[in-house]
Structures are given as structure tokens and as C-alpha cells.
Amino acid sequence: MFELLGIPPQALFGQLLIGLINGSFYALLSLGLTVIFGLLNIINFCHGALYMMGAFVAWLALQHFGLGYWAALFIAPVVVGAFGIVLERTMLRRLYKLDHLYGLLLTFGIALIVEGVFRNEFGASGLPYVIPDSLTGARNLGFMVLPNYRAWVIALSLFVCLATWYVIERTKLGAYLRAATENPTLVQAFGINVPRMITLTYGFGVGLAALAGVLAAPIYQVSPLMGSNLIIVVFAVVVIGGMGSIMGSIVTGFLLGLIEGLTKVFYPEASATVIFVILALVLLWRPQGLFGRRS
Amino acid sequence: MKTLRSLGLAAILALAAGPAHAQWSDGTIKIGVLTDMSSLYTDLSGAGSVLAARFAVEDFGAAAKGMKVEIVNADHQNKADVGSTIARQWYDVDKVDVIVDTPNSGVALAVTEITREKNKVFLVSGAASSALTGAKCSANTVHWTYDTWALANGTGRAIVRTGGDTWYFLTADYAFGHQLEADTENVVKEMNGKVLGKVRHPLNSSDFSSFLLQAQASKAKIIGLANAGGDTVNSIKQAAEFGIVAGGQNLAGLLVFITDVHSLGLKTAQGLIFTEAWYWDANDTNRAFAARFSAANKGIHPTMIHAGVYSAVTHYLKSLEALKNDADGKAVVERMKATPTDDRLFGKGTIRADGRKIHDMYLFEVKKPEESKKPWDYYKLRATIPAAEAFRPIDKGDCPLVKKG
């Protein structure tokens, strides 16, 4: 059997698949960020905290209301999305006319507050959330054991990513949204309620983060810190993909998952840094990102 | 951001008229709890360590004895540079006399150097690296609760003895992980076991599946987790998901705290074997302490680190009471070494010349869900490792303080 740099190909396939699984989280999270940035011009730094809230809503629903995983997949995005809408209505809305930096600072502050509150309430070690019965177990693919739950994560996030891309790039609703970003006054003149549309878009992007949180809950601990561990990477994904490019963030999410997975095999010590090295290289070579348009 | 939190209010005890002969530098004994207040080690040390220090001061009756004790705390964010800056500021500006706890070996190794330079006192409960009483030992540092050598010795020996003779390490990539891995590897090799490989992961990794797959491919009987806190929890959880234990390999959690077991739940954690210095449900005194502690700490029960902070602060105050002077850190530590330790949580013990506190260690196994009768009822005792065997022999650590005979 041939070996590639000392790694048997079967082990390599396993690692690539794991890279894809992690990539699907990156894709789902960076998608929400990109939608919010592309359509609202807000750098939503509290995305990680909202992802964490999604996981906590799932946990709380199970603990206090006996609502299981499948219900949480719908409840968490709605509850956290509603929280996002409140944020947008009461705070973010006031900053649209100012520089990006103000939105960044505000959302960063919100992230710190939300994480602080959850840490104070639930501690930092995290809480257990079990995989739903119908998705437990694993199948042996020959080259690796693939837990059923992870297969489900890839499938669902691919579906959600592509559906979002389709809605925004290929439907009438999406066309309104994009037009409203380009020239809100004109679109409003056609009788479309632009402020409401923007609020709902923000709520939708936040809901995507919460959905990723529910998907992550059974794999990682439900912990107040889970968002801040991930958010910087996700931002790197968005920047590498090109700020605001929806397909860009989906493809880059999966791609970076793969690259990170390979790094974990060949040079594991660098696995936390490799994404930022790529970020630096991309910024030097193509500052608008891989899929971004030059403004 | 996470700024320095100098909560001077933590425990300012009554300004009782102190006896005129005691020489407290600037009138106050100031204890600085330097710990992780916001990240993965918060529950196993963090605010609980501040609380334990406060209990120790209260139980000692410092105020009644005319000793004015103040406790401050700060968050080192698991960064050696942040920890060093705080330590320097505490010693130079805030007149802190002793720093306690300090989980994260990287930070603790930095603080031990600063403490030596400033001639203060450093009582380590949270950090693990056995280098603190080995090559990096200091006449100003006492390492209280446990260390990597004791963990490796307790857990490693027990596992190799029961047939786990091939190992693969999952190691946190910093001072602590490296030391724990090295100490365990020595034990495994000494007992004719083999280490088939190792992988080093960054601190605070959330996904371990790639590392676990590499461990699986090695076909080692035992996967040694040379990491801590959230990293250990995630490794164990994801190992179950990928069918590693079901496939015949076993996990050895080399450093597991009761808060980790609580976070995993017994269903996932059952059967894990590891070494600890203290368990809340071991006797009535410990139970009473745990009840008082958890009531003030959102129900979180004390870990061995919290108990160690209590014990260390108690002994420190006792030594100060005898010495009547806190200015010379080296003299205080000398006094602490000369006096046998005796407190309600750790019982009787001693401190060796290299700064190692000596007491029994315990090998625990996590109960099955049906064996657990009450909240936090998680461990059963497998073996007691007597104090004389629990820690690295004093002549094996290369500590310059130990005279070669």
C-alpha cells in the first residue's frame, strides 16, 4: 500500500472527512456573518456569543421544558433570532450611518456582556448535551468510523448554506435585499419597507448562528466559551472568502476546514495558527479576498 | 476587557488593634489569588480559589489574633506575560506578600521567577508542572496540592500494572502538557511499557476528532490525555462519539478534576481512572467544607485545588503567627518547611527542602450512573498512595536547593 508522506491513504481520507465536518461549522457561521455584513454593512462581532446562545437555548429547552434536539433545531434559531431583532431595533439601528468600527465595537461589547452573564450563571466547564437517539451510533466506512451525527451535521449545513445562497442570489426576495443595500432610498420609493427587511435579515443571520450552536451542542460541551473559541477563525474565513460574498464564505469555510484537518496530521502544533497564516497570505495577494469584488 | 480585578473588598478583616511586636510590612498581610477567572480553568480554580482563601483566613481567626489580612485577586488569562505583569505590580505597587493558586504551569513558572527576584512567597495549588520543585525550584515557592509526577506515578503505574502497556499521548502543547507527558512516559517505560506515538494539540482546541483518529490508528491500548479542563472533557466526549472505547482502546485521563466529571456526566465519564489529592466526600470534615463551599459557589463543589488553597493559606498564616514578620519571603518559606503542616482538609503533612508539600494521594475511579446516590457523588476509591511514595524522590528532581550527599 502506498503512503503519502508517511500517512496511509485510508487515514488521510478519514482526516479529510473530519476537515469537512469542521468546515461545515465554519461555513454555517461565516454564512450568517456574510449575510449580515453584505446586506447590512455590520461587522457582527457578537456572532460567536449568539452561536453559544443557540447551544444554551437547546440545553435549557431540554432541562426545563423537556424539549429534545429536533424541537431545539427550530426553537433556538427563533428565540435567538428574536433576541437579535431586539438588538438591531434598539441599538444597531442607530449606528448605520456611522463608520463600520462603531458597529464592531458595539457588537464586541455585547459579546463580552453575553458571555460574561452566561459564564457567571453556568460556570466555564460546560454542560453535557447528548446526541439524539436517532442519530447515535456510527457506521464503518472502511477507512474510518463516521459517527452518524457528524454525517447529519455535514448534510444539514450544506443544505442550509446552498438554500441561503439560492434565496439571496436567485430569487426576487433576494434581489430586493441586494437592491436595498445598494440604494435604500430608491427601493423604499417602490413601496418596500426597507427598515423591516433589514431587521429581518439581521434576525435571519443571527438565527443561522443559533442553528450552528444547536448542531454543535452534542459534539462540544455547551459552554459559555464555545463562541469566543470559534469566532476569530470564522472571521478569518469571511475575510479570506471576501467580505460579503456568500458563495465565497461557503466554499472557504469547507476549504479551510480541510486545510486545518491536514495540518492536524502533518504539523498539529500549528493547527490553531494555519488559518491566520493563510489569512495573511490572501490579504497580501488579493486584499478583497478569494471571491470578493474589488470595491 | 478582562481587566485586572483587584477586589480589595474580598476580605478586609477587622482593624483590630494588633500587638505591637508583630512586624507586618505596611501593616497588612496581603494575599493575592492569581488565577483563571474567565477561561477553561475557572471552575476548577478561579473564584472558588478566592473563596477557599477567604475561608482559610476566617477559620484561622486572623482578626482575633490581631493579624490584618486582605485578599485580592486577578485574572491571568492563561498568559504568562499577563500573569508576570500582575505579579510585578502586586509585589511592587500593591504590597502583596504572597501569591497563591495560579493554575496554568506556564504562568506559574513565570511567577516563581518573579517571586524569587522580589523575595516574596508563592504557594502553588493550581499548577501542575513538577519542574516547580525540580530544575526550576525556588526557596520562595511551595508546591502544594499535586504535580505531574504524582499524577503520572499514580495513574500510569495503576494502568500499566493492569495490562495497559502500549500508550499514545494526546498532549496540550505547553509547559504543563509536555511535563505530564514526559513524567508519564518515564513511568510507562520504567515498567517495560511502550509509547507508540504522541500528538500535541494547541491549548483550548475544541475539536479533537482528528487527533483521536491518529491515536486510533496507532492501535495503542491506552490513549493518555496529557491535557486538562475543557480539553480533557472534549477529548473524552469525542472519543466516545468515534467509538474509540467501544473499539477496545482505553482512555487515561491524567489530570481530571471533579468539575470535569460533573461537566461530562457519569454516563460518559464512568470507569475513568485518575489520581487526585483530595475528594469532598471522603470524610465528615471534607463534607462539611464542601457544603459550606458549594453554598457560596453556585453549587460547584470544591476541587482538590480549592482544598489545596485552603490548606496552603492556613499553613502560611500559622507560620507568620509564629514568625511575627512577613517581610522576608525566604524566611517565611523556611519557617513553613520547618513546621509540620496540619489542617482540617489535608491532615498532617510536611514540606520538603525542594518546596514539595507531601501528603497521601488517591487513585479514584468514576462511578457508574446507578452507583451514584446523591449530587456530586462521583468517585470510588481504588487505592491510597502513601505520602512517602506519592511524590518524586527528592534526589531525583535536580533541584539546586537539595544538597547532594
Image (cartoon, grey):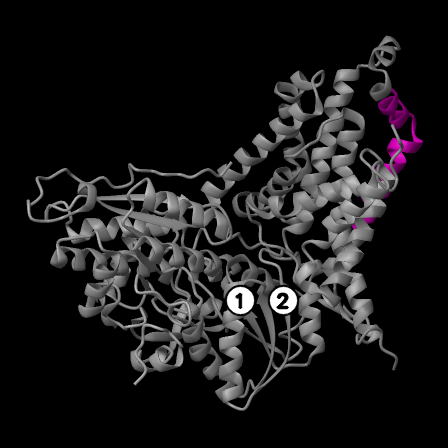
Residue drawn at 66 percent across, 43 percent down: A231
In this view of the protein, which residue sits in the foreground, B30 or B85? B85
Q: Is residue A291 left or right of residue B396?
A: right
Residue drawn at 41 percent across, 67 percent down: B136
The kind of residue on which mark 1 rests is Gly
Q: Is residue B347 left or right of residue A127?
A: left
Residue drawn at 21 percent across, 67 percent down: B341
Q: Which residue is mark 1?
A: B177
The reply to whether discs 1 and 2 touch (Cβ–Cβ < 8 Å) is yes
Magenta residues, dominant SS class: helix
Screen quadrant of the N terminus of chain A: bottom right
The answer to whether one can see residue A179 in this image is yes
Which dot marks residue B200?
Answer: 2
In this view of the protein, which residue sits in the foreground, B153 or A152? B153
In this view of the protein, which residue sits in the foreground, B13 or B96? B96
Residue A79 spot, x, y in % from top left? 63, 34
The kind of residue on which mark 2 rests is Arg
In this view of the protein, which residue sits in the foreground, B404 or B64? B404
Residue A188 to residue A18: above or below: above
Screen quadrant of the C terminus of chain A: top right
Residue B225 to residue A56: above or below: below
Query: For the magenta stretch, what is the residue range?
Result: A156-179
